[in-house]
Image (cartoon, rainbow, N blue to C red):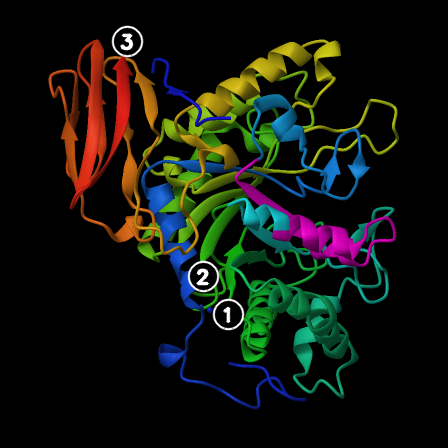
Amino acid sequence: MTNKIKTISCCLVILAGVNFLAKAIDKASASYHDMATEHLFQNLKALGDAGLHLFGVANAFDISYKKLIHEYDGSTDCKDITGSHPAFIESDFEWYIHKEHKAKWATEAIREAYKQGIVVGYCYHLRGLKSNDFYAFKDNKKTEDSTLLQDIVANPDRKANKALDWYLHRLDSVVIPTFKELGFPLIYRPFHEMTGGWFWWGTSCCTKDEFIKIYRLTVDYLRSNGVRNVLFAWSPDKSSDSTFYPGDEYVDIIGYDGYDVGLVDYNQIPAFVSNVAALADFAQRHNKIVAITETGTGKLLEAPEYWTKNILESLNADPKASKVSWIMTWYSADWNKDNKGVNYIPYKGIEKKTNGDKAIDDFKKFYNDPATVFQVDSLPLFATDNAELFIYPKNLTLTVGKKFTLIGGRKKDWSKNQVSWLSSDPSVVKVDAKGNIEALKTGNTTITIKMGNKQASCIVVVQ
């Protein structure tokens, strides 16, 4: 499949040995990322700054609505509907100990996604020491792990602190080996949704200071064990509250988690946009990436225009909220095999249900919007020696008065390039030195960038 034609309508203390505080380093001189990972950081930030968003689906390569947990076979729910895989995939270390999932499948899915130019990462629904559950409550009562986070950070002596030893063993046995085995740039989102009370690392079980301790402990321990290929994401739930923020040395990505945007009282569109805009502003001031790290609705048939109306148009209408580098939703799965499972994007067969065709049409519209990026778009986000020029998108349709930001340059270092932009007919579309274009009147024009004897072009149609 060729690049899609885009259209706009109307509009980071080192842990070592027994005592993880026994050694320290000069953080100012520490190398937290390897070069390839820093390269990805810069490109993702530049992508968001331009108002472009990778679309992501959790476990897209190894969980799907009909096939459930499976080995990657070349298909995804996303590709079944749009012709393309998502451009961002997050897995979960939970699957590495899950009885129905093979750790090999999860690792190979991430490896294969990276080979295809997809940005990849992990979260961790970490099951507790005593309850074997990641939730803080069971039958409306706190589980025996309600003090687990407090216990972990209470005593830095690993030999004396059973909870700390248990937690570090999880990192030693699953997280660190996986990061080192893969080796390429990854994103890790530990202890997500801390501003909610449902996890044992959330507000019902710890204070902000205790949360910050465990987040920093985690990052420091990974770094002390030689992990340099990870960008760390911090993602509150339906909130822009920064009191749980671990600090600039520990965070690369500011995220937002929140489902059912515009469909529930506690996450109406104005509040959603306001929170994301505030997080984007915070990210900009702290030189971080901002992203929608989880969203979606399990009521897609009731709100078939969710992806365009509730999410994309809402974000893009706000100059700050529009700077998110990706938008990720959860996997869809018909666990009971009764065709009543929860789906967050359309899947093959949903057209047989009421409003299923409308959900498909809307998701295709979301896919074709110039601000969304899918795997088929092949953006050069990872380190490469390729000096070929590119412009994204290659084809663009605008309406009069609409503005858009193109990105382009040499594939190996485009986010740092200073290139010259030229419109073949500036009376139709004008372009500035940063690739910002504005449609002035109906007609066609070509936007070109040149470096030496190389050039790349974008055809723009104004309707």
The residue positioned 82% from the left and 56% from the top of the image is: 133
Q: Amino acid at mark 1?
A: Arg
Left or right: 230 as drawn, with respect to 66: left
- Residue 442 placed where, x, y %? 21, 9
Residue nearest the viewer, comparing 13 with 353 = 353
The residue positioned 70% from the left and 67% from the top of the image is: 149
Q: Marks 1/2: CA distance?
A: 8 Å
The residue positioned 56% from the left and 49% from the top of the image is: 115
Q: Marks 2/3: CA distance?
A: 41 Å
Q: Amino acid at mark 2?
A: Thr
Which disc number belongs to residue 255?
A: none
According to the picture, the residue beneath numbered tag 1 turns out to be 228
Q: Secondary structure at mark 3?
A: loop
Q: Counting residues from the N terminus, which is met first, the one under dot 1 or under dot 3?
A: 1
CB under 8 Å between discs 1 and 2: yes
According to the picture, the residue beneath numbered tag 3 turns out to be 463
The residue positioned 12% from the left and 21% from the top of the image is: 426
Q: Does 238 sit above or below residue 38?
A: above
- Residue 456 placed where, x, y %? 25, 35
Q: Marks 1/3: CA distance?
A: 48 Å
Q: Counting residues from the N terminus, which is met first, the one under dot 1 or under dot 2?
A: 2
Write the start and end of the magenta stretch as one range.
86-111
Residue nearest the viewer, comparing 356 with 381 = 381
The answer to whether residue 192 shows anywhere in this view is no
Structural crowding at the residue carrying mark 3, measured as other residues with C-alpha within 10 Å and reported as few (<14), some (14–19) or many (≥20): some
- Residue 402 placed where, x, y %? 27, 19
According to the picture, the residue beneath numbered tag 2 turns out to be 37
Count of residue discs: 3
Image quadrant where residue 155 sits: bottom right
Q: Does 6 sit above or below residue 45?
A: above
